[in-house]
Image (tube, rainbow, N blue to C red):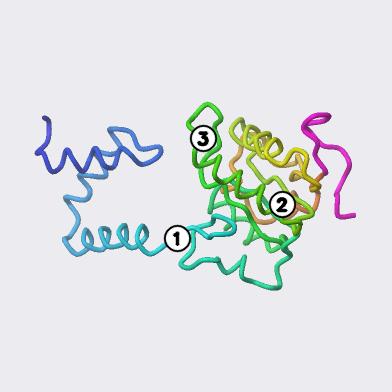
Amino acid sequence: MAFPEPLERLIRALERFPGVGPRSAERMALHVLRSPPEEVAELAMALRDARMETVRCEICGNVTLRSPCRICADPERDPGLVCVVEGPREVARMEESKVFPGRYHVLMAGFAPREGAAPEEAALAALRRRVESGEVREVVLATAPDREGEGAALLVAEALRGLPVRLSRLARGLPVGTRLEYLHGEILAEAFRGRRAWNPDSDPDGGEGDPSR
């Protein structure tokens, strides 16, 4: 064991975070040791509060302090227009664009069909129930234009197959391979305004123009 056992446990815990390898985990753990005790206590409290005081919205699946979330509870938002995103960060980016008048459905995990799909299957089942209620007229697929995002879009389309709902996707002007969470609000606004009806069986790239026109 290269480090004392408590430090080794901290390093192993940090390695569980996405994108954090052994070296990064070591650097972060050693930074914690160099930090004042009050900063370490603040970090520990923030981790606890984030985990214990937030819940998933019973309608859209987004992270919120109470359920339903403020967007689902807002009577001014259009319940017939639902935007499917991969996680809470994408909701934040869409809200910053101030162009989307509807509500959301959050898949919560990066959608990699090659990985275990239990959480995603629950999100898909919840989305299908929302559409089956008859209130939703259009589902906008706002998954990222990369391999995982394309896989997510196809799985959502399959989950909604046979239901009387319009599927559309954001305009293909989005940079290929870029995660939505990193895009500027104006880029997302233009992509939403240029969204196109989408039929994955006939034309994966869409082609009917803006379905709201």
Please give left or right for residue 112 compared with residue 29 in the image.
right
Circle 3 packing at 10 Å, graded few (<14), some (14-19), many (20+), is few
- Label 3: state its secondary structure: loop
Q: Nearer the viewer, mark 3 or mark 2?
A: 2
Q: Which residue in the structure is indicated by mark 1?
A: 55
Q: Which residue in the structure is indicated by mark 3?
A: 117
Residue contact at pointers 1 and 3, CB within 8 angstroms? no
Q: Position of residue 169 (x, y in %)?
A: 75, 43
Q: Which residue in the structure is indicated by mark 2?
A: 131
- Label 2: state its secondary structure: helix
Q: Position of residue 91 (x, y in %)?
A: 59, 56
- Label 1: state its secondary structure: strand
Q: Position of residue 16 (x, y in %)?
A: 33, 39
Q: Pick whichever of labels 3 and 2 is earlier in the sequence.
A: 3
Amino acid type, label 1: Val
Q: What residue range appears in magenta?
A: 197-213
Residue at point 69%, 73% (across, down): 75
